[in-house]
Amino acid sequence: MGRLFGTDGVRGVANADLTAELALGLSVAAAHVLAEAGTFEGHRPVAVVGRDPRASGEFLEAAVVAGLASAGVDVLRVGVLPTPAVAHLTGALGADLGVMLSASHNAMPDNGIKFFARGGHKLADELEDRIEAVYEEHGTGAPWQRPTGAGVGRVKSYDQGLDQYIAHLLGVLPNRLDGLKIVLDEAHGAAARVSPEAFTRAGAEIITIGAQPDGLNINDGCGSTHLDLLKAAVVEHGADLGIAHDGDADRCLAVDHTGAEVDGDQILAVLALAMREHGTLRHDTVVATVMSNLGFKLAMEAQGLSLVQTAVGDRYVLESMKEHGFALGGEQSGHVIILDHATTGDGTLTGLLLAARVAETGRTLADLASVMERLPQVLINVPDVDKSRVKTSAELSAAVTDAERELGSTGRVLLRPSGTEPLVRVMVEAADIEQARSVAERLADVVKSALG
C-alpha cells in the first residue's frame, strides 16, 4: 500500500477508495496513536468532528464517530462547517483531536479525512505515518484494545459552533464593512451559512451565489475553481468586489469591481501591506510557495518586504511560519494563513480582511491589487500519469533543461506531482504569454509520453 496521507490528509473517491471501513479504522488508529503519545494522559479524551455538505460525508462522519467512540474518545459533532472552523473549535474547546471530512476543491464524488492535533494544528508527518502503520497492522488481524462499559466514548451534537466561529472572525476585523456591496460565491460548500452571516454582521450588503448545498452540487461550476459566475455577478450587481471560497472554505480568491480576478498572490500582497501598516507583519516577511508568481516576489522586494518560499502545500507554509515566527503566508491558490488568528488557511477570514482593507482605505480592490504585476504564467494539469517518476525520468529532465535554457532569466519552469490527485502540474512563467503557453504545452506532452 502506498502512503495514505497526502499533503492534505487522506483523499479518494468516496465509497471506492475512501470507504466507511477505512474511515473507521483510521479513526481508531488515530485515537490509539495519540493515546500512546500521551495526548490523552490524565483526562477523558475529546474530539471535534465536522464535515462539508457532500452526501458521502454523512456515512463517513458516522464511521469516524463510531471509530473514535469505540476507542474511548468523547465526540462533539459540529456538523457542516468550514475546515478552519473545525480547527478553531478544536483549539477553543480544548479538544485533543479534530477531524474534518472534506475533499476541499475536488469534485463531489471525492471525499477526505483530515486530522487536527490539540490546538487545531495539522498532525506532524511522523504522527500520520504512525497512524497509517497502526491501521495497517490491525488490518492484518491484530486485535484492538477496546474499552467497555463507561470507558466507551460518548457522542454529542455541538450546535454552538457556527456562532462561536463567526464571533471569532468578527473579533479579528480591524474595521467594519459598512458601505460595501460584496458578492459571495460559497461553492455550495461548507461556508454557505457561515460566510454570508459573517459578512452581513460586519456591515456589508451581500449578494450570494452557490449557497444552496444539496450534497451533490459542491464545487460544481462555482467557487474558487470556477470564477466566471462570480465575475459576471459582480459586474451585474455593480458590486465593489466578489469573494469565492472552495468546498471546505479554507481558500479565498477575489474579483474586483471590473470583474478581474485577484488571485492568492495579490491577496497576500494587499494583506502584507495592511499588516505592516498596522504593525502586525512580524519581521516584515511573507511566506509563500515556489508556485507564487515571480511578480509577487518582485513586488514584495519593491516594498521593502522579505519573501520566504517553501515547497507547495499550505502545511509547509505553516511549518515555516511557526518555525521562524512569521505572521502571514499563503499560496497562489488562495490558501492564506494569518497565524495570529488561525492555524490553517481560512477563506472567510481572508475575505473579511481583504474587504476591510477596501473599506479602511477607500480604494478599490483593483487599485490595491495593482501593487503587483502578474507575469504571464501557464499551468497545465497532466492527469493519469505516474507522478512518482517526475524526478527520476531522464527524458523529462532533458526537456526541462531545454525549456529553462530557452526562457533564460525572464522565466522559470516548475513540475510538481499533485499531493492530492493522480496528476502532474506543469507551470511555466515567461515575459510573454505565448512563449509561456508554448513551452508549457511542449512540456505537458513530454510528461504524458515519459510518465504515461
Image (cartoon, grey):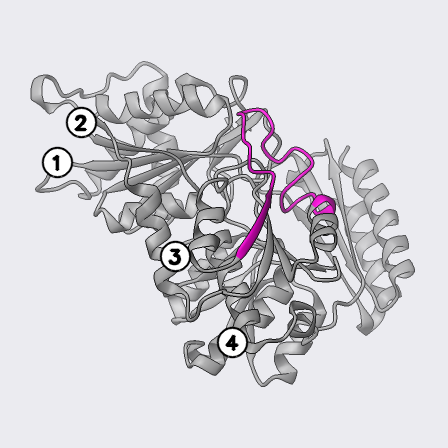
Q: What type of secondary structure mainly makes up the magenta span?
A: loop
Residue 342, visible in the rendered structure: no
| Residue indicated by mark 3 | 169
Q: Earlier in the sequence, mark 2 or mark 3?
A: 2
The span from disc 2 to disc 4 (Cα, nearest Å) is 46 Å
* Badge nearest the viewer, 4 or 3: 3
Crowding at mark 2 (Cα within 10 Å: few <14, some 14-19, many 20+): many
Q: Which quarter of the figure has residue 35?
A: top left
Residue 72: which disc?
Answer: 2
Amino acid type of the residue that numbered disc 3 sits on in the rendered structure: Leu
Q: Earlier in the sequence, mark 1 or mark 3?
A: 1
Amino acid type of the residue that numbered disc 4 sits on in the rendered structure: Ala
Left or right, residue 327 beside residue 383:
left
SS for callout 3: helix
Q: Are marks 4 and 3 in contact (CB under 8 Å)?
A: no
The span from disc 1 to disc 3 (Cα, nearest Å) is 29 Å
Q: Earlier in the sequence, mark 4 or mark 3?
A: 3
SS for callout 2: loop
Residue 44: which disc?
Answer: 1
SS for callout 1: loop
Q: Which residues are magenta?
A: 205-229
Q: Are marks 1 and 2 in contact (CB under 8 Å)?
A: yes
340 vs 187, nearest the viewer: 187
Amino acid type of the residue that numbered disc 2 sits on in the rendered structure: Gly
| Residue indicated by mark 4 | 274
Which residue is found at the position 69% from the left and 53% from the top?
Answer: 237
